[in-house]
Amino acid sequence: MTSATHASPGPFPSPSLSGAHGANPANSPEEARLAPGDIAVGVVIGRASEYFDFFVYGIASVLAFPAVFFPFASRLEGTLWAFALLALAFVVRPLGTVAGMALQRRFGRGMKLTAALLLLGSSTVGMALLPGHAAAGALAIALLAVCRIGQGLALGGSWDGLPSLLALNAPEGRRGWYAMLGQLGAPLGFLVACAVFAFLWANLSAADFLAWGWRYPFFAAFAINVVALFARLRLVVTHEYERELEARELEPCAVRELFASQGHNVVIGAFAALASYALFHLVTVFPLSWVMLHAEQEIGHLLSVELAGAVLAALAMPLSGLLADRIGRRSTLGVLAAAIAAFSLVAPFLLGGGTAGVDVFILVGSALLGLSYGQAAGPVASNFLPAFRYTGAALTADLAWLIGAAFAPLVALGLSVRFGPGAVGVYLLSGALATLLALRSHRIRLPRD
């Protein structure tokens, strides 16, 4: 990885940091106690809370929103409208990142993070308070869209640089393992969100679930965000971590300068993760809509399978770290993209294979997701020059989510209804091929970089 040429990969204290403070021995014991594991805790907690918020919306967009906000449309049309609103958060996320960078330059990292997570929590809990279409008509849909936009802006603005700091300070030969920790929040967030909905679905009548049951997870999200906020502020506002972030040059830069100097890294980095991000929603949110429309499977059973899939994804992520440390993170992404391409060829047969086929689709897809997504954030983004790494990593992730995941449920559901499940396989295959091409392009550019 070219990042090794820009910053020391060793554990705390880094050579650059100890050099900067070597004249003050009093700092040495304090800095020596810092370790990548301390950062990993904040990263996992922070990401899990964010993903919980997003998955709560994703699941509700299938189980509740068609009936609550789009009762005038068919089940298919209502779900498609809900998926269109789901994409809004990913469309505005880069704007949230840019606004957050400006806020950080003016008021500091702690203020930016507090504002972003309060916006995320209030937008999420605001959905729980919205009237349905029966009470407010089109205004209810407009308010839902506003809350969804708030989620996207907040998630972009909540970038704190801790995943980059974690990767840069990982011990030699363990970068894949520590990069995986930053991604572990995704299956954990989905696991908790799915468990809450599974409990409510199993213990409430259909009428109660649509009347008030679906709102409870959105209230819970606010409490989870408060806990996550304090866990992350405990890290990012301390002098120790401020010193580390400054020493690694993890500070905002001008977006225009970033794209003028390192724009190719942003684009290639986004497409290099495309297979993982496309698979992300296809094995979590999309199967719910597929089953709801075809009525071939009991939703309670499907939610149980989704829970098992989340566990498989979480267990597969450490394996991705071990594999990446053995063969390299870029090679790991390439191998997994090829595996996802092979999976896309059998996906149509699984989706059309009844209950057992859908179960296998979710479980195998979740295992592949854990392996690939565990390394999706770092191999190409690590090649940013130090001055551009902070903003570059954030916008690369934003673009990857926008291209790969934002419209995946909407496109997959629409194509599958019109052309059959084979279209889902073609869609997933296109994402895998885009990843392989991006990694190939990166390999060609790497010597010049």
Image (spheres, helix red, strand yellow):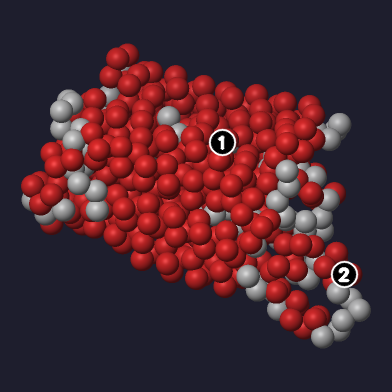
Q: Residues within 10 Å of mark 2 (few under 14, many from 20)?
A: few
Q: CA distance from mark 2 to mark 1?
A: 35 Å
Q: In the rendered image of this protein, does residue 112 appear above or below residue 402?
A: below
Q: Is residue 280 visible?
A: no
- Give the residue at x 44% y 19%: 426
Query: Of helix, strand and loop, which one carries label 1?
Result: helix
- Residue 258, image quadrant: top right
Q: Please tell me which residue lies in front, 58 or 167.
A: 58
Amino acid type of the residue that numbered disc 2 sits on in the rendered structure: Ala
x and y percentages locating residue 216 in the rendered image = 24, 57
Instruction: Say left or right for 18 vs 178.
Output: right
- Residue 200, image quadrant: bottom left
- Give the residue at x 82% y 68%: 17
Which residue, as the protein is rendered here, is positioned at the far top?
A: 419
Residue that mark 1 sits on: 400
Instruction: Say left or right for 143 vs 109.
Output: left
The mark that comes first in sequence, 2 or 1, is: 2
Q: Please tell me which residue lies in front, 298 or 241.
A: 241
Q: Where does the C terminus fall, quadrant-wise? A: top right
- Give the residue at x 71% y 73%: 240
Instruction: Say left or right for 356 vs 246.
Output: left
Q: Is residue 225 visible?
A: yes
Q: Residues within 10 Å of mark 1 (few under 14, many from 20)?
A: many
x and y percentages locating residue 162 in the rendered image = 63, 59
Residue that mark 2 sits on: 20
Amino acid type of the residue that numbered disc 1 sits on in the rendered structure: Ala
